[in-house]
């Protein structure tokens, strides 16, 4: 058994406990540790000594957990939807006037600074 495998086996329970504290689900924690291990084993240049390798793996595991939360946040995000019937003509006119005024004021400010 190589050095990385020995470290994985030796620290497996603590790694799962670490992940479980952050996600609350023991099965999900095991899956996250597996995903982290796959990422770690795919890296060619690993740290030289045991302490660095353990810290390095926990960094990978933490980032794997963060990725999970990001994926969940994106999956739970509600798309922006226009209301039925779209916007009314007076609202369309108001929007057009606001945009025109904003462009005009930016253009005036830009022209005065370039002179």
Image: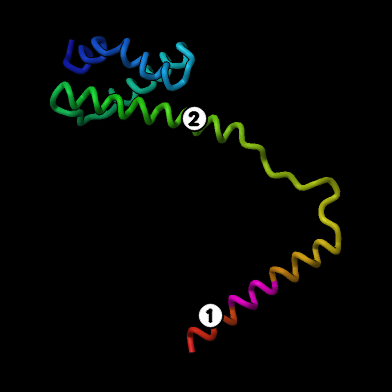
Seen as rendered, the residue at the extreme bottom is: 115
Residue at 13%, 24% in the rendered image: 49
Seen as rendered, the residue at the extreme front is: 21
Identify whether 88 is placed above or below 47.
Answer: below
Q: Is residue 18 left or right of residue 46?
A: right
Q: Are marks 1 and 2 in contact (CB under 8 Å)?
A: no
Give me the disc on residue 110: 1
Residue at 59%, 32% in the rendered image: 75
Magenta span has 22? no
Q: Quadrant of residue 66?
A: top left
Locate residue 100, reporting x and y percent: 70, 73
> Alpha-carbon neighbours of circle 2 within 10 Å: few (<14), some, or many (≥20)?
few
Residue 31 versus residue 19: which sits nearer the camera?
19
Predominant secondary structure, magenta span: helix
Locate residue 92, reporting x and y percent: 80, 63
Colouring scheme, one of rainbow, by chain, secondary structure, one colour:
rainbow
Locate residue 55, reporting x and y percent: 24, 26
Magenta span has 105? yes
Q: Is residue 54 left or right of residue 80?
A: left
Q: Quadrant of residue 84?
A: top right
SS state under label 1? helix
Give me the disc on residue 69: 2
| Cα–Cα span, label 1 and label 2 | 43 Å
Residue at 62%, 77% in the rendered image: 105
In the rendered structure, which segment of residues is drawn in magenta? 100-106
């Amino acid at each position: 058994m190589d050095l990385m495998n020995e470290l994985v086996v030796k620290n497996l329970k603590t790694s799962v406990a670490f992940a479980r504290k952050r996600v609350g689900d023991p099965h999900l924690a095991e899956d996250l540790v597996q995903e982290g291990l796959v990422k770690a084993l795919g890296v060619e240049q690993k740290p030289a000594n045991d302490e660095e390798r353990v810290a390095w793996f926990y960094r990978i595991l933490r980032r794997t957990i963060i990725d999970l939360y990001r994926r969940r946040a994106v999956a739970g995000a509600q798309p922006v939807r226009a209301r039925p019937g779209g916007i009314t003509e007076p609202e369309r006119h108001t929007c057009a006037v606001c945009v025109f005024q904003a462009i005009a004021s930016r253009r005036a400010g830009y022209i005065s600074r370039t002179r």
